[in-house]
Each structure stands twice: as C-alpha cells, then as structure tokens.
Amino acid sequence: EKKLRNTTSCYLVSLAIADLFVSIVVMPCCIVQHVLDYWPFGYTMCNLWQMSDVMMCTSSIMHMCTISLDRYTGIRDPL
C-alpha cells in the first residue's frame, strides 16, 4: 500500500522485528532459567544470552524513543 510507505510505518515495522527477536531469542531462555531455577545451557550460552538480552532489549527501547521523537516532530511541524 502506497499510503503506508512512510517513515512512521518503517519505524513500527522495525520495532516489531526487534520485539520479535526478543520474544524468540531472549524470552525462552529466561523462562527456562526461572522454571528450573538454574542455568542448564553452559557458560558460553549464558554469555551469548546475556549479550543478546542487553542488545535486543536496548534496540527495542531505542526504537520506541525514535518513534516518539518522530511523532513529536510530526505534531510540532505537521507540514
């Protein structure tokens, strides 16, 4: 759709992809850790999980900040 090809829609799609990665990569490991009450995957996987947790959650937060700034500038300078 031509009307949906704008900056805000691109930001929303990018946020959706970042949140999808969080839900696929970070959350299952977190659930396993909380259910078993220990980390069963080893030291290397723990480091990879922590790195991806910080990176992907920060990416999601930065996307939301960018969307809010985009909407603020859209309201402040509509044309």
Image: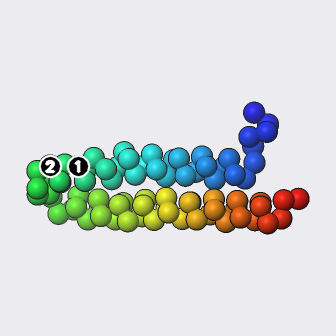
Model colouring: rainbow
**Residue corresponding to mark 2:** 35
Q: Are marks 2 and 1 in contact (CB under 8 Å)?
A: yes
SS type, badge 2: helix
Which residue is located at x 79 percent, y 66 percent? 76
**Residue corresponding to mark 1:** 31
**How far is the residue under mark 2 from the one under mark 1?**
6 Å
Badge 1: few (under 14), some or many (20 or more) residues near its Cα, within 10 Å? few
- Give amino acid for label 1: Ile
Name above or below for residue 22 compared with residue 43: above
Is residue 41 at least partly visible in the picture?
no
Instruction: Please provide percent x and percent y for residue 69.
Output: 67, 66
- Give amino acid for label 2: Val
Which residue is located at x 35 percent, y 61 percent? 53
Which residue is located at x 26 percent, y 65 percent? 47
Is residue 29 at least partly visible in the picture?
yes
Say left or right for 47 vs 55. Answer: left
SS type, badge 1: helix
Q: In the picture, which quadrant includes the C terminus?
A: bottom right
Residue 75 or residue 38, whichever sits in front: 75
Say left or right for 37 vs 62. Answer: left
Q: Single out the residue that lies furthest toward the right.
A: 79
Instruction: Please provide percent x and percent y for residue 16.
Output: 53, 47
Name above or below for residue 14 compared with residue 1: below
